[in-house]
Image (cartoon, rainbow, N blue to C red):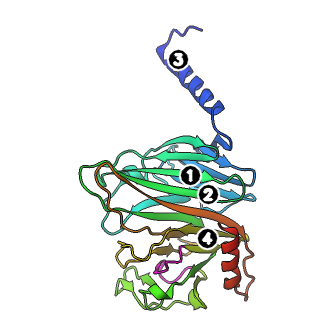
């Protein structure tokens, strides 16, 4: 077929390349549209669906088991790319680097366009643009198990500058609102008097080291976050390497991750994990934030950190009842491997 217009020829070649790429995708990977985002990569195994967005940062848009998305995906993102739609939306499965209070603004990493490619059965890679502000490029690789809900989320920080960089992994996942957070304590390496701290926004002192809040309680060897505290951001000193967030639809979102006890955690107060849990009227999400240790990354070198996500069936307590925390911990050890 001959084309008399160069533009038509380019479009035809593009359409052909897209079709061939779709045919060549590995097992458990396909291209789908999510809201107004075309050509997202979907990873699936018959039980679990994961969709990855690369249009505005490199994110997990859906982490779904039994038809329920554990992530808060803002419905307003359906208008992305349209007149009046959100310019730089940011919800669902977000990742970042820190420490929060000293890292420069990094629009290319947070809200820029990324690339997306399949790298194996139920596996994909999202890659950012090189970022001059931080001197790094981010690569995120996702692998869904052949069965079950286990999703491996690896973030690689590649130093593309001429100077050594010291950035750390910072997860900023928006889970659905209304759940109960369960954080196991490690008292032998305790740093915070109550096991948790609170960022008192607009208050004095700015960080409360002995906070008290009716929605945060110590119960046995766990801290339980029952709902939004009076200030939304709270941090923990746990090195257990896991936590659970039991959601109202009867599933627990479990994250496992490395939390070495002899490492340096560069956030302002050295926390290893943080929740940002606002009132539902402010945002219908709870942010689940593992913090990785500080890296020393030479020019041309990379550092990586992996979170392991799981969804397990666990009933949400009825009014007036409480979670059986020990039973939940046993279930996590058995099912979130």
Query: What residue appears at the point 54 percent right and 10 percent down from the top-left corner?
Result: 3
Return the x and y of residue 310 as percentages of the image width and height.
64, 64
Are dots 1 and 4 in contact, CB under 8 Å? no
- Which quadrant is home to the C terminus? bottom right
Residue 67 in view, yes or no? yes
Task: Tell whether position 1 is magenta.
Answer: no
Are dots 1 and 2 in contact, CB under 8 Å? yes
| SS of the residue under disc 4 | loop
Q: Nearer the viewer, mark 1 or mark 4?
A: 1
Closer to the chain start, of discs 1 and 3, is 3
Residue 323 in view, yes or no? no
Image side of residue 8 versus residue 324, left or right: left
- Categorize mark 4 by other alpha carbons within 10 Å: few (<14), some (14-19), many (20+): many
Residue under label 2? 151
| SS of the residue under disc 2 | strand
| 202 in relation to 313, above or below | below
Residue under label 1? 142
Mark 4 and mark 3: Cα distance apart in space: 47 Å
Are dots 3 and 2 in contact, CB under 8 Å? no
Return the x and y of residue 184 as percentages of the image width and height.
57, 81
Closer to the chain start, of discs 1 and 2, is 1
Residue under label 4? 177
Return the x and y of residue 42 as percentages of the image width and height.
63, 46
Mark 3 and mark 2: Cα distance apart in space: 41 Å
Q: Nearer the viewer, mark 4 or mark 2?
A: 2
Closer to the chain start, of discs 4 and 2, is 2
Residue under label 3? 8
Query: What residue appears at the point 40 percent right and 68 percent down from the top-left corner?
Result: 293
């Amino acid at each position: 077929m001959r084309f008399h217009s160069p533009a038509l020829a380019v479009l035809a070649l593009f359409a052909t390349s897209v079709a061939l790429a779709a045919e060549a995708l590995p097992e458990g990977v396909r291209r789908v549209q999510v809201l107004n985002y075309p050509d997202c990569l979907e990873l699936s195994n018959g039980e679990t669906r994961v969709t990855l967005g690369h249009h505005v940062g490199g994110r997990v848009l859906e982490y779904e088991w039994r038809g329920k998305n554990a992530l808060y995906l803002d419905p307003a993102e359906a208008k992305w790319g349209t007149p009046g739609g959100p310019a730089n939306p940011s919800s669902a499965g977000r990742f970042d680097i820190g420490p929060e209070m000293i890292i420069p603004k990094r629009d290319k990493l947070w809200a820029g366009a990324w690339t997306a490619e399949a790298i194996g059965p139920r596996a994909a890679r999202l890659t950012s643009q090189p970022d001059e502000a931080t001197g790094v490029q981010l690569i995120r690789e996702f692998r869904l198990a052949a069965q079950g809900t286990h999703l491996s989320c690896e973030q690689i920080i590649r130093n593309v500058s001429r100077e050594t960089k010291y950035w750390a992994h910072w997860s900023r996942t928006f889970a659905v609102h209304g759940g109960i957070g369960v954080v196991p304590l490690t008292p032998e390496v305790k740093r915070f008097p109550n096991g948790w701290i609170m960022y008192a926004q607009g208050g004095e002192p700015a960080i409360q080291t002995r906070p008290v809040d009716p929605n945060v309680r110590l119960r046995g060897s766990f801290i339980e976050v029952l709902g939004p505290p009076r200030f939304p951001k709270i941090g923990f000193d746990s090195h257990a390497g896991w936590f659970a967030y039991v959601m109202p639809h009867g599933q627990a979102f479990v994250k496992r991750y490395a939390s070495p006890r002899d490492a340096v955690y560069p956030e302002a107060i050295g926390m290893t994990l943080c929740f940002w849990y606002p009132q539902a009227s402010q945002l219908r999400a709870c942010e689940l934030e593992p913090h990785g240790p500080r890296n020393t990354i030479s020019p041309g070198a990379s550092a990586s950190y992996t979170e392991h996500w799981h969804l397990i069936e666990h009933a949400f307590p009825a009014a007036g009842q409480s979670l059986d925390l020990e039973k939940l911990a046993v279930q996590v050890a058995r099912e979130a491997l």
